[in-house]
């Protein structure tokens, strides 16, 4: 069991009426005292961003008001609200994506970022994905050339049972590794791919008859550093997720698979996890780069509907690479 507790839990920071109360020893803080019905003052905006850099997940409980406008205002603190890279490439303009019971995406033409060299052919990776073993832990679409900086979730329909969203700190997971393992992983790159079922999940035919061909050409396997730095604090993070990572470059297939499984089990440890139980009026922001998230699958036969807005663009960057 990991022992690293990276946040002092007795900390509450009253300033300009805003309070920040940690929710676990490693990830998550509840924010109170922010009026999201109007533009935020620079001071409040700065404090929210500072809390975000420190806690990775911010819960605005009983946000008044927890409207779509408040959600968008909050998202805009972390960059321009925009759809995930895949939806931009396919043609979406709308920043919000609805989950359960329906999804919604539309046409757009965002300029595509530079394509990476494909280190490994997609067919070599078939059958390696291990996501099923780890219950859906992921960062969003890490096979794309950039990630959103933040996501904000608002629940429109909360089931009477189940329905919690979970988050894991990749910085706390890195800190808890032994120095030997940290040093050994330092220069390794991980290969991220479009996982099985992803294309079906986003209903590619909606985007035209050539959508699948365009999508496949745009998204070959992509390499990212396994150890990255937090863009604001410089903390190191273990950038792995069972949803998309299928290979560690330079290792034999069996070695790679065993290590990925070990690291994915590590990041899913309850030591680094905050589990959010939704209440009416909640808005939850999370870091798409140095936190993983997991949607629930435990609320059937009840309905659940959440709306997500993603904002900003970021790229996973290895320590010392200056990016
Ligand atoms: C998501 O994966 O973005 C949604 C999380 C949730 O449904 O709780």
Image (cartoon, rainbow, N blue to C red):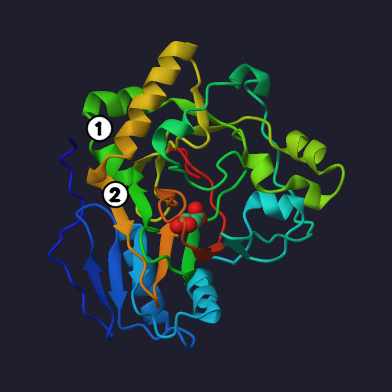
Name the foreground residue: 239 vs 140.
140
Q: Earlier in the sequence, mark 1 or mark 2?
A: 1
* Pointers 1 and 2 in contact (C-beta within 8 Å): no
Residue 273, numbered label: 2
Marks 1 and 2: which is nearer the front?
2
Residue most toward the front? 301
Q: Is residue 290 left or right of residue 27?
A: right
Instruction: Name the quadrant of the N terminus.
Output: top left
* In-image side of 209 versus 185 (left or right): right
Q: Residue at x 69, y 36 (%)?
A: 219
From where the camera sits, is residue 79 visible?
A: yes
| Quadrant assignment, res 310 | bottom right
In the rendered view, tell whether residue 187 sits above or below residue 10.
above
User: Which residue is painted at 87% across and 44% down in the image?
Assistant: 209
Residue 27's place in the image compared with 16, above or below, is above
Q: Of helix, strand and loop, which one carries label 1?
A: loop
User: From the viewer's perspective, is 287 left or right of 14?
Assistant: right
Residue 170 position in % (x across, y down): 35, 44
Measuring 37% from the left and 21% from the top, which residue is drawn there? Answer: 259
Q: Residue 289: horizontal and vertical position, in percent?
A: 45, 49
Quadrant of the rendered image containing residue 210: top right
**What percent of the width, then of the height, locates residue 281?**
40, 78
How many numbered discs?
Answer: 2
Q: Secondary structure at mark 2?
A: strand
Does the numbered disc 2 mark a residue whose Cβ is under 8 Å from ligand 1? Answer: no
Q: Nearer the viewer, residue 69 or 294?
A: 294
- Residue tagged 1: 177
Rendering coords of residue 105 (x, y %) = 70, 59
Tag of residue 214: none
Outermost residue toward the bottom in this view: 38
Can residue 234 be seen here? The reply is no
């Amino acid at each position: 069991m990991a022992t690293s507790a990276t946040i002092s839990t007795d900390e509450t920071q009253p300033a300009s009426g805003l309070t920040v109360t940690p929710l676990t020893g490693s990830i998550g803080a509840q924010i109170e005292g922010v009026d999201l019905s109007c533009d935020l003052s620079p001071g409040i905006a700065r404090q929210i961003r500072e809390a975000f850099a420190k806690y990775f997940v911010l819960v605005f409980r009983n946000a008044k008001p927890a409207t779509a406008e408040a959600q968008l205002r909050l998202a805009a603190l972390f960059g321009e609200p925009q759809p995930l890279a895949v939806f931009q490439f396919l043609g979406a303009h709308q920043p919000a994506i609805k989950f359960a019971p329906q999804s919604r995406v539309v046409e757009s033409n965002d300029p595509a970022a530079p394509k990476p060299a494909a280190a490994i052919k997609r067919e070599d990776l078939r059958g390696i994905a291990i996501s099923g073993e780890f219950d859906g832990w992921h960062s969003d679409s890490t096979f794309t050339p950039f990630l959103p900086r933040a996501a904000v979730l608002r629940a429109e329909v909360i089931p009477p049972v189940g329905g919690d969203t979970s988050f894991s700190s990749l910085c706390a997971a890195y800190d808890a590794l032994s120095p030997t393992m940290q040093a050994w992983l330092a220069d390794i790159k991980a290969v991220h791919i479009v996982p099985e079922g992803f294309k079906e999940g986003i209903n590619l035919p909606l985007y035209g008859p050539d959508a699948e061909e365009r999508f496949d050409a745009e998204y070959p396997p992509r390499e990212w550093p396994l150890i990255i730095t937090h863009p604001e604090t410089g903390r190191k993070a273990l950038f792995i997720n069972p949803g998309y990572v299928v290979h560690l470059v330079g290792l034999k297939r069996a070695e790679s698979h065993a290590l990925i499984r070990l690291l994915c089990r590590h990041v899913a440890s309850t030591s680094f996890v905050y589990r959010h139980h939704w209440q009416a009026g909640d808005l939850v922001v999370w870091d798409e780069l140095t936190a993983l998230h997991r949607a629930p699958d435990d609320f059937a036969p009840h309905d659940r509907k959440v709306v997500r807005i993603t904002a900003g663009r970021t790229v996973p960057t290895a320590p010392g690479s200056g990016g």
